[in-house]
Image (spheres, helix red, strand yellow):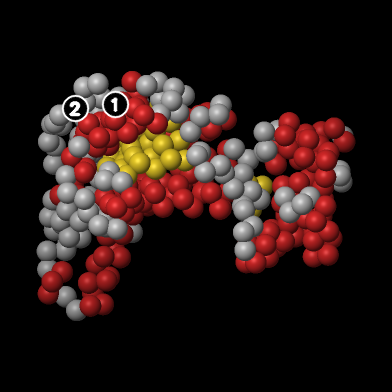
Amino acid sequence: MTVPSQVVHVDSPTEQRNPRTTDIDRLPTREILSVINAEDRRVPEAVAAVLPQLADAVDYAVEALRNGHRVHYVGAGTSGRLAVLDAAELVPTYNVPEDWFVAHHAGGAQALQRAVENAEDDAKAGAEELSASVEPGDFVLGLTASGRTPYVLGALLAAHRKGAHTALVSGNPRAMRPAGVEVLIAVDTGPEVIAGSTRMKAGTAQKQILTAFSTATMVKLGRTYSNLMVSMRATNAKLRGRTLRILREATGAGERECADALAQADGDLKVALMHLLCGVDAPTATAMLAASGGHVREAVDACAACSA
């Protein structure tokens, strides 16, 4: 498979000098922090400007997961580390299968702690990794502050050729849409406080986009009820206590009643929730959840419709 050997270089705003921070090395500590904070406040507006494109990415991800496929993240450096973090946190937070979200980081696991020379420049490595792991119907989200990282672009092109849907989060609104990218999410966070230090505003924007993307995907898949985490994995005492509090918050029932419901549901918060909200036993609640694809809100609404 051929992959892009080079990309037309278009300077990213993140590489420019920031006129608002040229004297940062002359400032006292408190003012340095104030300048950084003022720049950081520009990030949410930049992310808000790309919400329509981000919504398209979410819809692709939901479609993929509903049809038994997977979501892949691809990044290098800060982008890759943020992607690995987001994928890892979804498993305990929403109790998703560990292979639903797969993070691909240039340079592999060793690059999470220290830079691996030239890993991000290897388009062939990105292409080979995604060619080996992506299936038709998957969704692949690439992340690159420059908009031109060869590892990421090679991976996206290979994924597209395999029949996956693709999107790219780029910090360079001036760069052209790369080959194989269906949804371009180009965030303009402007020059960094320290020129070229994309772990700052560009990284903050990527973090916001990733958490919004994955959270919206989980909401659409019914991994929440209202704004409560009802699919989390209670693996320790803190989370078991949180499970009980969530059940009380969602139903208004007392602690003893919620504890009994969880016991009857073998600790499954969704089943206990259905039991208390709909007045059905655990086996019936389990069947109703299966019919709704695990979507609690849909199962509760269906129960209410039948009772009406």
Task: Give the residue type at disc 1.
Answer: Leu
For the image, the number of numbered tags is 2
Q: Is residue 206 left or right of residue 247?
A: left
- Position of residue 49 measured from the top left corner of the image (x, y, whole percent): 36, 42
Q: Is residue 46 left or right of residue 300?
A: left
Position of 205 with respect to 174 (left or right) is: right
Is label 2 in a helix, a strand or a loop? Answer: loop
Crowdedness of circle 1 by 10 Å Cα count: few (<14), some, many (20+)?
A: many
Task: Give residue 264's mark.
Answer: none
- Cα gap from disc 2 to disc 1, whole angstroms: 9 Å
227 sits left or right of 60 in the view: right
Based on the displayed image, in which of its 4 quarters is residue 249 positioned? bottom right
In the foreground, 242 or 41? 242
- Crowding at mark 2 (Cα within 10 Å: few <14, some 14-19, many 20+): some
Location of the C terminus by quadrant is top right
Point out the image quarter for the N terminus.
top left
Ranked by sequence position, the earlier of labels 2 and 1 is 2
Q: Are marks 2 and 1 in contact (CB under 8 Å)?
A: yes
- Disc on res. 157: 1
* Quarter-of-image position of residue 67: top right
Quarter assignment of residue 173: top left
Secondary structure beneath label 1: helix
Q: In the image, is residue 159 above or below residue 18?
A: above
102 or 165, which is in the foreground? 102
Q: Residue at x 23, y 74 (%)?
A: 31
User: Label 2: which residue?
Assistant: 4
Q: Along the line of sight, which residue is nearer the eye, 284 or 301?
A: 284
| Depth check, front residue: 135 or 144 | 135
Compared with 187, 227 (above or below) is below
Three-letter code, disc 2: Pro
Residue pictured at 40% horizontal, 21% vertical:
163
Instruction: Please provide percent x and percent y for residue 73.
Output: 38, 40
